[in-house]
Image (spheres, grey):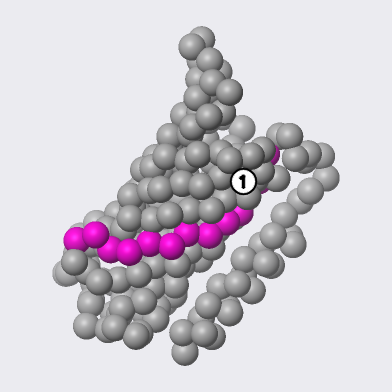
């Protein structure tokens, strides 16, 4: 069952890449990005999460006088969660605020979003319901004009909209391609 969900996530990822508009977008603008993340829970939930995502820079940005740039990004992610040999599928959409250093040496980011899970019970872990909210923060290091790596901390919970409100807290590593 795990292989089928990973295949489905990869098909959705490739489909999103193939349907992204490319006219008028050059590699130097870097308006679009895609990548993958892997993470493990940090508070004893014993859950792993594997993400594939596509993102688009939003038009709101501001060049600060110090040379730093404040920008925005919207991201769609498909996620496979694993606990005790059982897999679950979720999807989320989020917006990020980006703070990019002069000469693009480092990018600090933080974001919020919402998502839904295929099944709110994974192994013996009950998330309380299908809908969840998320927040994350991290740092990205561009290694070239198109490739970067990042680390981020992520928090997901249902915001007490259900009777149970357990959280999922992850430390994640990200690989991102910008085009």
x then y, percent, for residue 42: 24, 59
- What residue do we see at 56% from left, 45% from top? 148
Residues 1 and 176: in front is 176
Q: Give the residue drawn at x 79%, y 48%.
A: 22
Q: Is residue 23 visible?
A: yes
Which image quarter is the C terminus in? top right
Residue 114 is situated, as x and y percent measured from the top left of the image, at 40, 56
- In terms of secondary structure, what is the magenta stretch mainly? strand
Residue closest to the eye, 172 or 34:
172
Looking at the rendering, which quadrant does residue 158 occupy? bottom left
Q: Residues within 10 Å of mark 1 (few under 14, many from 20)?
A: some
Residues drawn in magenta: 30-43
Q: Relative to residue 47, is residue 140 depicted above or below? A: above
- Residue positioned most to the front: 143
Task: Using the image, determine if residue 49 lies above or below residue 21.
Answer: below
Identify the secondary structure beneath mark 1.
Answer: strand
Say whether residue 12 is magenta: no
The x, y position of residue 171, in whole percent, is 33, 55
Residue that badge 1 annotates:
147
Task: Answer left or right for 171 relative to 77.
Answer: left
Percent of width and height locating residue 28: 73, 34
Q: Does the magenta-highlighted stretch encompass residue 39?
A: yes
Left or right, 7 with reference to 48: right
Position of residue 67 relative to residue 85, above or below, is above
Seen as rendered, the residue at the extreme top is 65
Q: Is residue 86 left or right of residue 99?
A: left
């Amino acid at each position: 069952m795990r292989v089928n969900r990973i295949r489905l996530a990869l098909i959705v990822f490739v489909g999103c890449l193939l349907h992204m508009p490319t006219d008028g977008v050059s590699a130097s603008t870097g308006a679009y990005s895609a990548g993958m993340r892997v993470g493990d829970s940090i508070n004893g939930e014993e859950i792993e999460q594997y993400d594939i995502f596509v993102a688009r820079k939003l038009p709101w940005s501001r060049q600060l006088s110090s040379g730093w740039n404040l920008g925005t990004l919207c991201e769609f992610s498909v996620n496979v969660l694993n606990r005790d040999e059982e897999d679950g599928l979720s999807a989320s959409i989020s917006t990020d605020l980006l703070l990019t250093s002069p000469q693009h040496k480092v990018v600090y980011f933080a974001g919020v979003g919402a998502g839904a899970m295929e099944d709110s019970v994974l192994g013996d872990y009950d998330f309380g319901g299908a809908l969840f909210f998320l927040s994350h923060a991290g740092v990205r290091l561009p290694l070239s004009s198109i490739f970067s790596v990042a680390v981020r901390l992520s928090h997901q919970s249902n915001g007490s909209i259900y009777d149970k409100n357990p959280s999922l807290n992850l430390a994640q590593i990200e690989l991102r391609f910008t085009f």
